[in-house]
Amino acid sequence: MSGAVHSPAAGEPTLIERFGWRGAVEPGIARVVSSHGDYYRIVCNESPEPLLARKKKSAFARMKVASPDGIRAVKRAGEHPDAPVRPVTGDFVRFRHNDRGDSLILEVLPRFSVFERRDPTARRSSQTLAVNYDTLFVMMSLNEDFSVPRLERYLALAEGAGGETVVVLTKTDLARDEADVRVAELRKAADGRAEVIAISALTGDGMDGVARYARPGRTIALVGSSGVGKSTLLNALAGEELSATQEIQEWSGKGRHTTTVRELSMLPSGAMVIDTPGVREIGIVGEEECGLAKGECSHRYRK
Ligand SMILES: Nc1nc2c(ncn2[C@@H]2O[C@H](COP(=O)(O)OP(=O)(O)OP(=O)(O)O)[C@@H](O)[C@H]2O)c(=O)[nH]1
Ligand SMILES: [Mg+2]
C-alpha cells in the first residue's frame, strides 16, 4: 500500500492520531465519525477529507479477539461479549483504501471503552451508545428530566465500561429554587463515582468545568435523555452550530428525537465529541424504551 497522503511536519501528530489513535501509526487505520445504514464516514491518514466506506459483510460474523488462552473465535467484537458486531461511531477500524470509490472496512479494532444499554430480559439485544471515549458525560437536566434512580442506572452502566464518567446537570437557568436541592441530591448519588458539574449553555454558568475535559486528542461522549441539551453543549463547546438542536427540527414530526445519528465532531480545542440521540430509559426491565437512529428506533412516535 502506498504511504499516507497526510504528512504533518516532523513531531506533529498525523490525522488519525489527532482523531485519538494511540497505537502504532500504520496505513489502513481509520476512525468512524458517523454511520448511515451500510455506509460509514471515516477519517484516516490516507485522505485529508473524510471518506465513505462500506463494511465487508463477512468480516463481522465471527471475530477473533485476544483472550487469556490466546486467540479464539468469538461471536462478537471486542472485549465486551455483548457488543454488537457492526462498527459504530467512534470505532477504530482497519480498512482497505480505495481512492476511486468506497473504501472497505475489514475489522473493528479493540475498543478501550464501551457504554452500552442492556436489556436484562434479553428480548432486545444490548445497544452500544458510545465507544472509545475518554470521558463520558452523563447528562441530565435540572428541570423535568431530573431523576436520581435514572442517574444511578447510568452510573452503574458506566462503571467498568472504561473511561472516566462526569455527571453534567444542565439548564441551571431553568431550575431556579429547586436547582441547589437537586444538584445536592445528585452529588450525593454520584459521590465517589463521578464529578458532578452543573451548567447552563444559555448563561455560560459552569461551562469552564466541562471545557476542562475538551483536551486535544481526547474524546468526550454525550449520553442522556432526549432534550437534556447534549447537542446544545456540543455547539457551545464548538463555538458554532455543528448539530441541530430541538427548536430547529421540532416541526419535522419525528417525535422527541432531534439528533438521530451518532456523530463524532472535532472541536477547535482538538478534542472530539460524540453526540448521541437521546435515550428515554436505560437498562431497565419493562420500562418504555426509545430507540435511536433510523432503523434502530422502537419508539412509539416512529411506528
Ligand atoms: N434554558 C436552557 N435551555 C437549554 C439549555 N441547554 C439546552 N437547552 C434547550 O433544550 C432543548 C433541547 O436541547 P438539545 O440540545 O436539542 O437536546 P438533546 O439532548 O441534543 O436532544 P436529542 O438530540 O433529542 O437527544 C433546546 O430547545 C435547547 O435550546 C440550557 O442550558 N438552558
Ligand atoms: Mg441532540
Image (cartoon, rainbow, N blue to C red):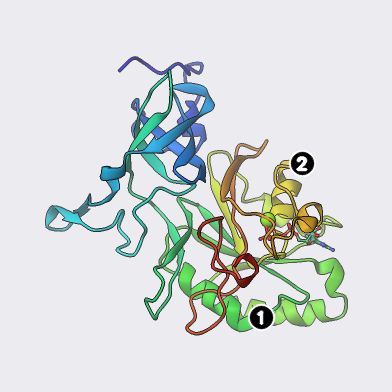
Q: Find disc 2 in the rendering and name its residue.
A: 239
| Total numbered labels placed on residues in the image | 2
Residue 70 against residue 58 in the figure, above or below: below
CB-based contact (under 8 Å), mark 2 and mark 1: no
Residue type at tag 2: Gly
Few, some or many residues within 10 Å of mark 2 (<14, 14–19, 20+):
few
> Where's residue 244, x and y in %?
73, 49
Residue type at tag 1: Ser
Q: Earlier in the sequence, mark 2 or mark 1?
A: 1
Using the image as rendered, state which of residue 75 and residue 234 is in the foreground.
Answer: 75
Residue at position x 69%, y 49% from top? 234
Work out whether residue 237 can be spotted. yes
Work out whether residue 138 can be spotted. no
**Res. 240 image quadrant:** top right
Residue at position x 38%, y 50% from top? 86
Residue 205 against residue 103 in the figure, above or below: below
Q: Find disc 1 in the rendering and name its residue.
A: 147
